[in-house]
Image (cartoon, rainbow, N blue to C red):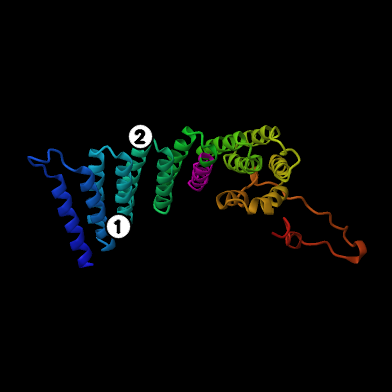
Amino acid sequence: MASKINEAHEHIAKAEKNLKTSMTKWKPDFDSAASEYAKAAVCFKNAKQFEQAKDAYLKEAEYHTENKALFHAAKAIEQAGMMMKDLKKMPEAIQYIEKASMIYVENGTPDTAAMALDRAGKLIEPVSLEKAVDLYQQAAGVFENEDRLRQSAELLGKASRLLVRLRRLDEAATALQKEKNMYKDIENYPTCFKKTTAQVLVHLHRNDFVAADKCVRESYSLPGYSGSEDCVAMETLLQGYDEQDEDQVHRVCNSALLKYMDNDYAKLAISLKVPGGGVKKKTAKPPHGGAGAPAASAEDDDDYEGGLC
């Protein structure tokens, strides 16, 4: 470890030397200085001196910027962020990665910017769902501006699921609609079907039956949706919800189609309640004394209420 630290300081000394000017050297050699700081950063990183590694990466970025090598400057700033991640300083890590992504965009490499923001979202997700949503939405916006709709929709999907987890359902509904429109534009209709199901669940949890019904009706225009398994399930769910039929809603929400959705939507399904507590349909009972059998008790009648699930 000590040898790596000494090696890092040797590279820093070389960098400082490259920055000096003289009678025969009128301009600092920013390119060589940046290269030496990059080597120093790696040495500090290998020695697990992450704070010093971060400082070295930032110096590298500074001299790349002086040399108009903005892409390399952004890469160095992103690496500084990763050093903060290793120090468990997530907010600082994200700040550096966001700064790097802005430089990537300015430098004409938006794909790299979006991927950096996606990585940042994954890093911060265990710490702050709210910030992760913001980063995924930023990344989606970058891809959308480049007409990379599939990648944009995938990132919007991450944001939508986290918005559901945060119970920010109004925003989730908006994000889902945008996501669904993108999949429609690229003619990925089966995914549109799944997004319609997610929309219905979100709207019903918002107590907005009209919006849920509208999502299904609008989806009839999607090739293959009408009569599909997804369509029939949503029609059945909406009918049961509208009629306050607890059994029917329970059957649909506990079907394999909904239970094996992304976890956040599956939780919406199994927790969905009909308004007013709903009603359970009673099974017919034989008359008292009929065939010598006693009437079933209310407790017995409920043993398998809603079916096995």
Q: Which residues are magenta?
A: 152-169
Q: Quadrant of the C terminus?
A: bottom right
Magenta-colored stretch includes residue 158: yes
* Viewer-closest of 155 and 251: 155
Residue at point 25%, 60% (across, down): 43
Picture coordinates of residue 261 (x, y %)? 61, 51
For residue 106, the mark is 2
User: What distance separates the C-alpha of mark 2 from that of mark 1?
Assistant: 29 Å
Residue at point 47%, 39% (across, down): 140
Q: Is residue 53 visible?
A: no
Residue at point 35%, 38% (across, down): 102
At mark 1, the secondary structure is loop
Residue at point 29%, 43% (across, down): 73
Q: Residue furthest front?
A: 24
Query: Please, is residue 3 above or below residue 282 in the view?
Result: below
Hey, what amino acid is under mark 1? Leu
Task: Give the labeled residue for mark 1.
Answer: 87
Residue 15 falls left or right of residue 295:
left
